[in-house]
Image (spheres, rainbow, N blue to C red):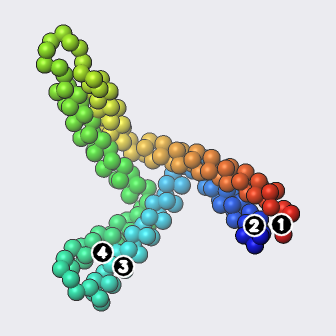
Amino acid sequence: MATRSLIGRSWWILMTFGVIAIVFGLIAVFQPLAAIAALTWIMGIMALAEGVSTLFMTATAYRGAGKGWLIGYGVLSILFGLLAIFDPLSMASALLVLVGIWLIIAGVYRLLLGLRIRRPVAGQGWAPGEGWTVLSGVLALLLGILLVVSPLSGLVATALWIGIVALVYGVIQVIAALRVRKMFAGSR
């Protein structure tokens, strides 16, 4: 009975998560660049903390092999963190350009793979999956080119998707909170 009472009294936690998610979702949908900047800024703080703690641990307590790799990792984490904190949109754009380059390479690979898996006997048509492989290559190539040419478009699209998911999550949390509150109203 104590668990039911605790759950019943904790409905407001679900409600709080739901409201925060809805507010963030609305910001991401209506101010997508601000949302991406905020997320990148948070990632920058985490990377900075990771870098500082890695360097501190390496300098004070680490005695194993690979110390140089740890120092390099710590320094790169600090640099990434500082760049993300002081220029979050440029950092997010740069990351999307890297994703775009990867998609271009993956698209070319899939196109070549799709064209190579043709049946050797002429007139038998396409091998199973060949068309889908070629299509996935074309789509990856086009998306990669879009992200390299216009990373800002990719940032806005990413923020919109995140915002929509956050809105759906928030609404579900609010509904769950109201149901928990109603269900456990008598168990106080």
Relative vertical location of residue 177 with respect to residue 57 in this rendering, above or below? above
Residue where numbered disc 2 is placed: 4
Q: Quadrant of the C terminus?
A: bottom right
Residue where numbered disc 4 is placed: 74
Q: Position of residue 46 (x, y in %)?
A: 43, 70
Q: Position of residue 131 (x, y in %)?
A: 30, 23
Q: Amino acid at mark 3?
A: Val
Q: Which is more foreground, mark 3 or mark 1?
A: 1
Residue sitting farthest toward the front = 1
Instruction: Work out how far the residue at label 4 is from the one at label 1, CA to CA, in angstroms.
Output: 52 Å
Residue where numbered disc 1 is placed: 187
Q: Earlier in the sequence, mark 3 or mark 4?
A: 3
Splitting the image into 4 quarters, where does residue 146 fall?
A: top left
Q: Position of residue 164 (x, y in %)?
A: 58, 45
Q: Earlier in the sequence, mark 4 or mark 1?
A: 4
Relative vertical location of residue 120 with respect to residue 79 in this rendering, above or below? above
Residue sitting farthest toward the right = 186
Q: Amino acid at mark 4?
A: Gly
Contact (Cβ within 8 Å) of mark 3 with mark 4: yes
> Under tag 3, what secondary structure?
helix
Q: Is residue 94 visible?
A: yes
